[in-house]
């Protein structure tokens, strides 16, 4: 008997997306797997949907994943999307499942971990304090201060040329309203957003940033969200300095947690930054894409 698939709707859409979900259950109502489809709604990404599909290990190879995938892909088509992306750990059952169902690998990511208990504190302090002539750092918690909001929004174009392989990810258009909404969303779930920014000392404009999200109460892992420098200001070591400062901030609050980061395999400069700070690779993941 094929699994029963029940459609669900996320009651709390974010400012930039909304989600649909499906639950697969057996004859007795026992859960077998689930699928979540994130539909992006902001300008520049309305062609895109992101899939997360999970099947209980004991229920794999029985058609559960296929039924859930058909439901999610059908919904994406119904919404007029042209691209569905999904991610799987390299070498995992999900990796093989996506590849066998028409998805193609478009990007490889390296995941890395830094245990703050093992941090070489003197080394990271030296990296954070290294002079960067013509620049200085500033930092804030949560929502960007009003006097920095416009220049911070303008600096977000530093992410536009980050390596994305062949992913049809579109363009993320950042403005002050979107920055504020993103920071507020993190705060509402109880986590803490800490941002370090590099400032051009000649005119006071922000030219780079590094975002770190720390778990509520220090229970769990921290996560780097993004580190980038505007193209015209690269080559001065700003990314390393900003990320080092963020690591020191995390260590001052929660010296026993770990920080996680993921970087495109092709992004050699950022991988070198991670290596110098002491991050150690844990695994690789493949970003898959289905063209509808």
Image (spheres, helix red, strand yellow):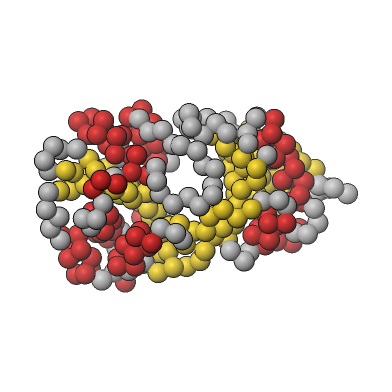
- Whether residue 236 is visible here, answered yes or no, is yes
For the residue pair 148 and 208, the one nearer the viewer reads as 208
Relative image position of residue 109 (x, y in whole percent): 49, 58
Relative image position of residue 272 (x, y in whole percent): 34, 65
For the residue pair 28 and 17, the one nearer the viewer reads as 17
In the rendered image, the quadrant that contains the C terminus is top right
**Residue that sits furthest to the right in the current view:** 1
**Residue 187 occupies quadrant:** top left
**Residue 224 relative to residue 233: left or right:** right
* Residue drawn at point x = 64 percent, y = 53 percent: 104
**Residue that sits furthest to the front in the current view:** 232
Relative image position of residue 69 (x, y in whole percent): 72, 45
**Residue 164 relative to residue 204: left or right:** right
Count the marks.
0
* Residue drawn at point x = 21 percent, y = 55 percent: 236
Where 138 sits versus 264, above or below?
Answer: above
Relative image position of residue 31 (x, y in whole percent): 72, 49
**Residue 259 occupies quadrant:** bottom left
**Residue 123 relative to residue 166: left or right:** left
Where 268 sits versus 188, above or below?
Answer: below
* Residue drawn at point x = 64 percent, y = 60 percent: 95
* Residue drawn at point x = 54 percent, y = 47 percent: 167
**Residue 258 relative to residue 41: left or right:** left
For the residue pair 61 and 233, the one nearer the viewer reads as 233
- Whether residue 242 is visible here, answered yes or no, is no
Where 252 sits versus 49, above or below?
Answer: below
């Amino acid at each position: 008997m094929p699994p029963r698939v029940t459609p669900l709707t996320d009651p709390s859409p974010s400012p930039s997306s909304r989600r649909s979900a499906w639950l697969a259950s057996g004859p007795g109502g026992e859960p077998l797997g689930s699928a979540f489809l994130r539909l992006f709604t902001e300008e520049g990404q309305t062609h895109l949907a992101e899939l997360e599909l999970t099947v209980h290990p004991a229920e794999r190879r029985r058609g559960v994943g296929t039924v859930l995938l058909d439901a999610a892909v059908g919904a994406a088509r119904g919404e007029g999307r042209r691209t569905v992306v999904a991610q799987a750990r390299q070498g995992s059952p999900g990796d093989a499942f996506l590849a066998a169902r028409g998805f193609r690998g478009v990007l490889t990511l390296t995941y890395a971990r830094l245990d703050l208990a093992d941090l070489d504190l003197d080394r990271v302090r030296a990296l954070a304090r290294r002079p960067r002539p013509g620049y200085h750092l500033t930092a804030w918690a949560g929502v960007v201060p009003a006097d920095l909001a416009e220049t911070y929004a303008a600096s977000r174009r530093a992410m536009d040329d980050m390596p994305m392989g062949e992913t049809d990810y579109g363009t993320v258009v950042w403005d002050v309203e979107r920055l504020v909404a993103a920071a507020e969303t993190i705060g509402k779930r109880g986590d803490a957003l800490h941002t370090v920014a590099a400032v051009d000392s000649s005119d006071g404009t922000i030219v780079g940033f590094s975002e770190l999200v720390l778990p509520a109460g220090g229970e769990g892992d921290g996560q780097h969200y993004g580190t980038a420098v505007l193209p015209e200001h690269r080559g001065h070591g700003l990314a390393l300095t900003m990320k080092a400062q963020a690591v020191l901030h995390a260590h001052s609050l929660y010296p026993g947690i770990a920080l996680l980061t993921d970087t495109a395999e092709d992004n050699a400069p950022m991988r070198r930054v991670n290596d110098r700070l002491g991050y150690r690779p844990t695994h690789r993941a493949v970003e898959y894409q289905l063209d509808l």
